[in-house]
Amino acid sequence: MKQNIYDNNTFFRKYEEIRSRENNYNNLLEQPNFFTLLPPVKNKVILDIGCGMGDFAAYCIGQGAKSVTGIDISSNMIAHAKKRHVHECLTFEQCAFEDLTVPNGTIDFISSSLAFHYIADFQLLIKKIRTALSEGGILLFSLEHPIVTANKENENWVTDQEGNILHFAVDNYHNEGLRTQNWLVDNVVMYHRTMSTILNTLIENGLQIEKILEPIPTEEAVSKLPSLKKEFRRPSFLIIRASKS
C-alpha cells in the first residue's frame, strides 16, 4: 500500500502550519541529531527518499554535492520543492521509491527523514537501497521509533484523573504491520516494525550498522518547546546510519 497522505489538502495545510513554526519536533530534535550522522557530501551522488519540500536536498547541493535527486510521492511536496530550490545539479521527482529504477551501484549516499514508516515492504526497500548504493555508500535514515508505532490505535499516554502522565502505553509490540492513527486527520497509515526487524533487515542485506541514535532533547530545546520533556520518558525517533560493505 502506498499512502499519499500529504496530498490530502486538509492534512497538508495543517502540516505546513506545524513546519512553519520555528520550534517544532523536527527542528529541535530529529534534524539536529540527523545532521550529526551526516557523511561528507562533497562530490557525492545523492538520493533523498521522501524529500518533502527539498530543504535537505538543497543543503547537500550547498555543501558541494555532485548531484542530488529528491523523490517524494506527494505532488504537493514536489511542487513546493521545485519552487523553493532551483539548481542545475538538483532534481525533484514525484515518485514512490518502490517504483523508482536506479542503476546498480550508482548512488554514494541515500538519505531519508521520517519516511520509511510509511512504506509497507521494508525488506524490499532495503534490498533496493543496497543495490543502488555504490561500494562504501552510506544510508542515513530516521523513522518513528518502534516504541511509538507499537500502539497507534489507542491512547499512547496514560494519565490519572488529574491529567498527570503516569506512563506511555506500549502494546502488541511484536504484532508487526499496518497501524492507523489520528494525526492532523483520521486514518493516517504507517507500519510498525520491531527494533530487531529493522536492524536485522539491514544486516541481512549486507549493510553494516555504524551508528544508532534515539534522540533526547537538549535543555535549550526543552526551554523552547516544553512538550519535549516527554522525550525523556520515551523516544519519538530512531536514526540509523549504515554502509554498504
Image (tube, helix red, strand yellow):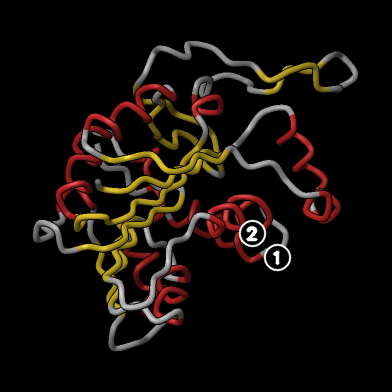
The picture places residue 135, in percent across and down from the top left corner, at 20, 55
Other-residue count near label 1 (Cα within 10 Å), few / some / many at <14 / 14–19 / ≥20? few
| 202 up-or-down from 19: above or below | above
Which mark, by number, is residue 152?
none
The dot on residue 27 is: 2
The N terminus - image quarter: top left
Secondary structure at numbered mark 2:
helix
Residue 149 % position (x, y): 50, 27
Q: Reply above or below: 11 against 92.
A: above
Q: Amino acid at mark 2?
A: Asn
State the image quarter where residue 171 is shown: top right
For the residue labelled by badge 1, is the local secondary structure a helix, a strand or a loop?
loop
**Residue at 77%, 49% in the rendered image:** 218
Q: Residues within 10 Å of mark 2 (few under 14, many from 20)?
A: some
208 or 77, which is in the foreground? 208
Do tag 2 and tag 1 residues touch (Cβ < 8 Å)?
Answer: yes
Q: CA distance from mark 2 to mark 1?
A: 7 Å
**Residue that appears at 73% across and 46% down:** 217
Q: Position of residue 154 (x, y in %)?
A: 57, 19
Mark 1: which amino acid? Glu
Q: Residue 117: x and y, percent? A: 40, 38
* Nearer to me, 95 or 206: 206
The answer to which of 148 and 141 lies nearer the viewer is: 141
Q: Which residue is mark 1?
A: 22
| 89 with respect to 232 (left or right) | left
16 or 90: nearer the eye? 90
Q: Reading the chain from its start, which is encountered first: label 2 or label 1? A: 1
Residue shown at 44% from the left, 37% from the top: 188
Of badges 2 and 1, the one in the foreground is: 2
Q: Is residue 205 above or below residue 200?
A: below
Q: What residue is rendered at 85% in x and 22% in y? A: 163
